[in-house]
Amino acid sequence: PIVRPRLPLIRFQVMPLLVVHLVLTSLDCCGNSQESSSAQYILQQYMAASGGYKMLQSVRNAYAMGKVRMVASEFETATRVVKNRGPSGRGAAAVEQGGFVLWTMAPGMWYVELAVGGSKVHAGCNGRLVWRHTPWLGAHAAKGPVRPLRRVLQGLDPLTTAGLFAEARCVGEKKVNGEECFILKLSADPQTLKLRSEGPAEIIRHVLFGYFSQRTGLMVHIEDSHLTRIQPHSGGDAVYWETTISSCLEDYRAVEGIMIAHAGRSAVTLFRFGEAAMSHTKTRMEEAWSIEEVAFNVPGLSVDCFIPPADIRSGSVGEACELPPQHGDRAKSTAVHPARVAAAAERAHTHGAGGRGEKIVWRVEV
């Protein structure tokens, strides 16, 4: 069939996307090679819309400061659903607020501090090792290859984002928050999943989707999903944890010639299933975030700022981390934690374990 381009969506500065749009609307003739080629067109336009490759390459380091606010939470079992919404709902008093500071430096170094609801998390990467420091585990190294911080991908570092999606495939189109978007899909290869698995916790799948506006070329939505299978040491049925994080990127503004998303919302869903048919639990938490300050090429920022803690435990605790059972005020004090919400796992454990004292395995990422 003849496909007519939707011209009202196309402007001069994003004209290369017209070619991609015409290719994608004829899905019958799209193979993997064509999907990869279309993805490259979309990423080229994304970098152009973000400030241009030359401008993005000129950034040696960056600093960002922002605020986070938990705006909703929900816990579901086979028999009941508990909701908490704020700030106007009945659960307004439970809304937690906090902030974060983030530093990055080429190539591949980053450091973040995040404080919400009385808990503080540090994480970093010196280009060779990813590490985290949490109140419940102390300092520990993450297993597997070095990878970027997810919060950086939420509209703060276009060059890193484009590099991450370099091997992605274009899998179609979708309207997101009123914007017609192209969808890029990236799946972790089996070898990477194996390297990131540890002990009884096996990461089965990790898929990342990026949604790029046909009108502006900018990324307006990002979503990733992990599926982890946990085989108990004592035998028995495996337990599965599916973690999905969906982020909407808004309020793009230029900072020193680079387009940065200054606001957005992230929703985290943890779905635990397996064992008995009626034993599943689902926890959903939502945060709103805003960027207060951004600066590039900060004088004085050096590689010394990204040195891991001296007491880091390498190899003993990786991405699959055991959290001890939480009771009473301890669980309540960390009831909210943004992206990769560690406290959500605590709440899921507190509600789902039924007081049996069992441990759960949870992936900690900021």
Image (tube, rainbow, N blue to C red):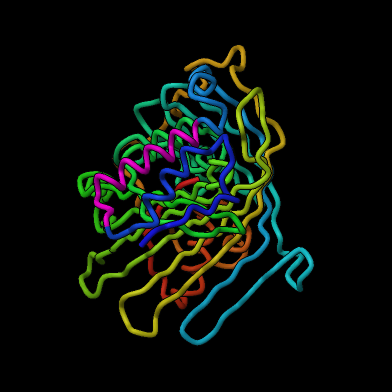
Q: In the rendered image, which quarter is residue 359 located in?
A: bottom left
Residue drawn at (31%, 70%), measured in percent from left and top? 239
Residue drawn at (79%, 67%), measured in percent from left and top? 88
Q: Position of residue 98 (x, y in %)?
A: 68, 47
The verdict on residue 339 being magenta is: no
From the viewer's perspective, tell me whether residue 185 is left or right of residue 74: left
Residue 228 higher or lower than 155, as above or below: below
Extreme front residue here?
2
From the viewer's perspective, tell me whether residue 235 is left or right of residue 133: left
Image mark count:
0
- Label the magenta part by its dominant secondary structure: helix
Q: Position of residue 257 (x, y in %)?
A: 63, 24
Extreme top residue here?
300
Q: Nearer the viewer, residue 106 or 95?
A: 106
> What stretch of residues is rendered in magenta?
29-47
From the viewer's perspective, tell me whether residue 200 is left or right of residue 15: left
Residue 77 higher or lower than 303, as above or below: below
Residue drawn at (58%, 60%), measured in percent from left and top? 330
Q: In the rendered image, which quarter is residue 141 located in?
A: top left
Residue 282 higher or lower than 212, as above or below: below
Say whether residue 225 is visible.
no
Q: Nearer the viewer, residue 329 or 83?
A: 83
The verdict on residue 46 being magenta is: yes
Q: Nearer the viewer, residue 363 or 120?
A: 363
Q: Position of residue 1 (x, y in %)?
A: 35, 62
Residue drawn at (59%, 17%), measured in percent from left and top? 297
Say whether residue 124 is visible.
yes
Q: Position of residue 261 (x, y in %)?
A: 62, 40
Q: Nearer the viewer, residue 113 or 162?
A: 162
